[in-house]
Amino acid sequence: MLDNVLARIVGFCVRLPALIIVPALLIALGSGLYVARHFAVNTDVSRLLSPDLPWRQREIAYRSAFPQQTESIIAVIDADIPEHAALASQALVDRLKANRTLFRSVRDVAGDPFFRRNALLFLDNEQLDARLAKLGSAAPLLRILGPDRSLRGLATTLSAGLRGLQGGQYKLDDMAPTLNAASDTVESVVTGKPKTFSWVNLVNGGPVKAEDARRIVEIVPVLDFSALEPGKTATQAVRKAANDLNLASTYQARMRLTGPVPISDEEFSSLQQGAALNGILSALIVLAILWLALRSWRLVIPVGATVGIGLAVTAALGVFMVGALNPISVAFAVLFVGLGADFAIQYSVRYRAERHEIGELAPALVSAARSVGTPLTLAAAAAAVGFLSFLPTAYRGLAELGLIAGCGMLVAFIAAMTLLPALLSWSNPPTEGRPLGYAKLAVADNFLKAHRIAVVVITSLVVLAAAPALRNLKFDFDPLSLRDPTSEPIATMRVLASDPKVGPDSAQLLTTRDDAAALRPKLKALPQVDSVRSIDDFIPADQDRKLHAIGGVARMVDQALRGRSRPAPNDGENVGALRQAAQNLRGVAGNAPGVGAVAARRLADALSKLADGSADLRKQAETAFTATLNMSIDDLKTSLQPEKITLDHLPAELQRDWIAPNQQLRVQITPKGDANDSENVRRFAKAVLSVAPNATGPAIETFEWARTIIAAFVESGAYALAAIAILLWIVLRRFSDMLLTLIPLLVAAAATLEICALTGFALNYANIIALPVLLGVGVAFKIYYVLAWRRGETNFLQSPLTRAVFFSALMTATAFGSLWLSAHPGTSSMGKLLALSLMCTLASAALFQPALMGQPRTAKADQDIVEEPSSARRKLNMRGVGIAVPRVLSRETWNRIRHRSGSQS
């Protein structure tokens, strides 16, 4: 009955093509205009999952309480010395703060006056005592250097410091780092490459570490979520400010941007990279495939137009149903071209076969609809069900894609059954001079017939033998894994991953003060936890003792720096001081071995060269040493004037970072071990949740994303299989035939996942979309073969059906291949998995399924007979040849007689 209905519909479209084509063009035009006016993409990745999930509600609450933690740009400034990093970051902060239109807040936490003043209070007692002892011993030197901040004062201070060796206050080896640092600076000036001396490193007593010469500027921008890159304008403004400030030349510093906003923007920027070129190449390849399948532009153009119009209508429906698309649902166009074109190809290839048998255009178009009507209807319904099965799940991003793609399958089917026949009737393709199919594959067909049991058994054994590998299937739902690891935001975030001040993979907890105090020891006891911090950690311990100790050293330093400034020296005085310092260095070093003596002789040689050089060279050397001296002395004075800290005395910005508007405290828990190891982060998240079930934060979100997505796919898979099984039962009415359709599908799915497990190819929240696509494509291909087999057809590899399936698969592979070529790693992995699943599906449909089905049933056993309508039970008079048509015929016999009659005509 369905075949007859579709045949009548196609007959009407063929007789009156203008009534179909003109409205279709108008609908396509209206759809295009609607999409152009209303198309939007919301790039907020957090919207991909349902906000009703408990952990999502915690995430939303946290983001609402602390937007600066989740909607920020992090400018990482690295310099050669800490002083340059501080100067560069302060210059950038001052420049950005002036732009209140683009930036809500800008700050350098380490450069905050509160931390500059009270930094010593945050040291433990042992560290503080060591630092104060070093400052106390430097007081006599500050008496010389403070009033005379010149090359003469520097050389004199060095000579005075060497006299401390005689009193046994320290050893020459202890001075080696300082002497070598001074040598580096002098030698760089002598060789024409001036280098600024770091007084911070001198105080710290060692060479600079990367994190010591790094400043982190936290920027909270104004975002535009209607744009594909919401933070692009703000990010560009930050980069422009850095360029205008000439950070590289002025401070020997470089700036890199990372954080949630640049990472998100970079992801969607990579989605666009090469998209236009890939789209053009894909379109050309699609046309080439259609040409190879149809061999006539009068066929290719109608099919292409049908797909294009269907895509426009689907896009309009999608925008109407979901509003703004999401980063997952934007893939609907690729899915439509890859899967929706299947119906047009199946119908067109079948039309060519019918045209060869019948000869005339209109009867061939109607006969093609009668032949493929039921398979296409069932395939479209099954594919739509496969996509729509995501609607009940929490994976809202994929549910929206499923809704659009599911409706798109119905649009593609309707277009293939109405618009395409009308266009073909209008274009009037040439007749087909030879049969379709692949006669050369008869050998393969005969092999499958002769060894079908062996093919089924071996395939089943191979799939079952590889099943244990599924335990090693990787699920990588770390958002950073789907980004280009060489991009600036990702590479920078990897560097910062182990920095507790940033904590990109930390867990966060919103709780009361009492609960925080109760949870802290439990969290610290977890072996996976490195640190637990809250606002209370900014209240130093033993403040009275520390303030007393700092006060004593502060008085010593203050007295040392009170001396009256000396007049600036002339060049001769500088030369004399340099030569005296060199002589003193050689005197204390002599010919003794050891790192200290070697460093002393090295510096003596460098100072001698500087003394023998030009006055301009010595001026450069003086600048290299004194450029940051005043800043360092000011910082020293400030750090020796701390104040007792209470919660009320903490800066307002700091309190906003740790206390929510509802007065709940934020507790930050950082992981122990490699923060870039996703498995380590997963163990950390599980451990934290076992103690604090209400935890959130990046580590928890990554863990919960994985659990939610996997659960969504299990749930949707169960829905889809159940719905498709019911659909197949309604149409096929045989449990065995339903199994013949589903078993090859399950074999293809198992083979796809097993290959992923064996090759180490990880599933992620982007490429996992291949599984519902596998279901849609797989069911369609299997249905075509099962229904053809039920009609009594055999030798599938050499039949027009396999030609249609092959070119349909090739079309799908081309569409998915455009994803593989994407610069975005997540999208590229989607294309790879789609291609793999398609290969397994095609092999299962064309090779495993015919072997599994075997020979068709007899007409009596199958009872697959049809009674043609009374209008057909008549004599067909074709050129005077009368063919009596019996009242009841097997479907296969009826088709054979009908085709033969048409060819005679």
Image: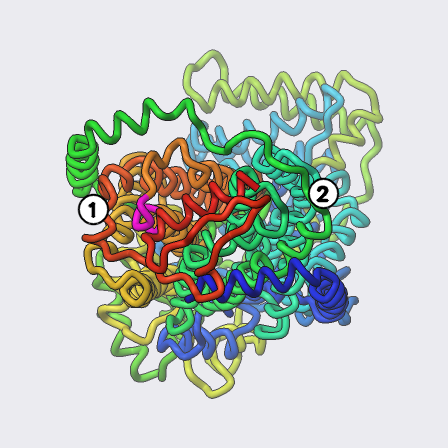
Tell me the residue at 51%/36% (across/down): 207
Q: Amino acid at mark 2?
A: Tyr
Asked if residue 37 lies left or right of residue 466, the reply is right
Q: Quadrant of residue 732?
A: bottom left
Tell me the residue at 49%/44% (across/down): 901
The colour scheme applied to this rendered structure is: rainbow
Q: Position of residue 3 (x, y in %)?
A: 45, 61
Toward the top, the furthest residue is: 591
Q: Nearer the viewer, residue 397 or 218?
A: 397
Q: Nearer the viewer, mark 2 or mark 1?
A: 1
Q: Amino acid at mark 1?
A: Arg
Is residue 526 shown above or below 273?
below
Is residue 612 shown above or below 753?
above
Q: How many C-alpha atoms fall within 10 Å of the one at disc 1: few (<14), some, or many (≥20)?
A: few
Q: Position of residue 42 (x, y in %)?
A: 61, 67
Inter-mark Cα distance, 2 to 1: 53 Å
Magenta region includes residue 789:
yes
Is residue 354 shown above or below 50?
above
- Classify the position of the N terminus by image quarter: bottom left
Q: Which numbered tag is attached to residue 471?
A: 1
Q: Secondary structure at mark 1?
A: helix
Q: Which residue is mark 2?
A: 251
Q: How many C-alpha atoms fall within 10 Å of the one at disc 2: few (<14), some, or many (≥20)?
A: many
